[in-house]
Amino acid sequence: MTLAEHLAAQRSAVPEYADGAAAIIQAIGWVARDIARALAYAAIRGDTGKAGLKNTTGDEQKPLDLWSHEVMAGALRGSHACAAYVSEEAAEPIEMMEGAGPHGLVVCCDPVDGSSNLDVNGSVGTIFSLRPSRGQVPAGPAALGPGTDQVAAGYMMYGPATTMVYTSGQGTHGFTLEPQSGEFLLTHPDIKIKRRGKTYGINEGNFHTWHPGQRAYVEYLRTSDKASGRPYSLRYSGAMVADVHRTLLDGGIFMYPADFTDPAKPKPKLRLLYEVAPMALLVEQAGGRASTGTERVLDVRATEYHQRAAILIGSSDDVTQAEDFYRRQA
Ligand code: AFP
């Protein structure tokens, strides 16, 4: 089954936005093919290194960040269903009159997630989330609100194969790009994440900045105890897409907790609208769980476009246990 056939069969959980969501996800699929090809040629064409610019959240922009952002904008405009585009690479939402209207959707996107992996040929991805514009003009502000507002979400992972995973509120489904035809073919229908895993993903270099409950939980995972399947193995790629994709298929937990150096002002890193909230919807739709450590991620209300949030995501028993450690050390 191709992506187009699946989108047609998969009526979104929010029918009034189904056609728009299908048009946008199809358009994003086309962009994925272009990004996958550009990645394959990046070193040959010299599209590597830094672009000498920084985005709103202070990250060095790479040439492929900027190129992917532009290609994504063009495809979303062409879908005639996108009313506004909130991108990691643009300070403000880009309004798109072509998609404005009662069923217009706001697309929040990280065009190249894990761009620090680009120059080392590591896995990178694209993350997207669709929210209802409710006919608002300008539509961009309609992106602000809880993650439960999302109509659909997904990511592409550019690894040995190019994978696309999406949900429109009726389960989470995975596709693999068939390079000859350029078709995304259904290879992982209705993904169900294990209740408990054997791996954890976190940047341990930040250990000294963590909440005491986070430290205690990682110490617990490292401790040898056959009966509870510990120690867990550490797996960390530096690209959230790759780490969440592994967690979705193998179980376990991926975490990017806040920096608690100043407990009164915890500093998370990952961005809520185009990293944390879309991944939370995908994993919950696969039977998993996504928490900030103290709250369900999908209940967190976005009040700014580039707002950051902590995330502990994956197998429900593992995430619940991590939350217990936070509670006990609160
Ligand atoms: P970049 O897109 O700037 O490489 O950041 C990637 C990311 O947002 C997310 O994909 C990773 O999980 C996380 O940051 C990696 O952060 P550290 O480099 O601090 O581990």
Image (cartoon, rainbow, N blue to C red):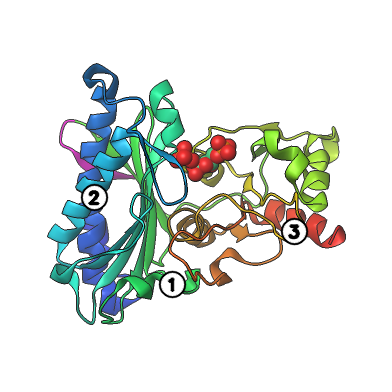
Q: Is residue 186 magenta?
A: yes
Mark 3 falls on what kind of element? helix
Say what amino acid the circle numbered 3 marks: Glu
Considering depth in this image, is 59 or 327 the residue closer to the camera?
59
Say which residue appears at 82% left-offset and 50% top-offset: 212
Dot 1 corresponds to which residue? 144
Say which residue appears at 56% left-offset and 51% top-offset: 193
Mark number for residue 304?
A: none
Is residue 174 at all visible to an observer of this figure? no
> How far apart are the alpha carbons under marks 1 and 3?
26 Å
Most common secondary structure along the magenta stretch:
strand
Query: Residue 181 sits in which quadrant?
Result: top left
Residue 223 vertical position relative to residue 244 in the rendered view, above or below = above
Dot 3 corresponds to which residue? 323
Say what amino acid the circle numbered 2 marks: Met
In the shown orientation, is residue 187 left or right of residue 225? left
Dot 2 corresponds to which residue? 72
Q: Are marks 3 and 2 in contact (CB under 8 Å)?
A: no
Dot 3 alpha-carbon crowd within 10 angstroms: few under 14, some 14 to 19, many 20 or more: many
| Numbered disc in front, either 1 or 3 | 1
> How far apart are the alpha carbons under marks 2 and 1?
21 Å
In the shown orientation, is residue 45 left or right of residue 320? left
Q: Which x, y percent locates residue 27?
A: 20, 54
Q: Which x, y percent locates residue 277?
A: 49, 61
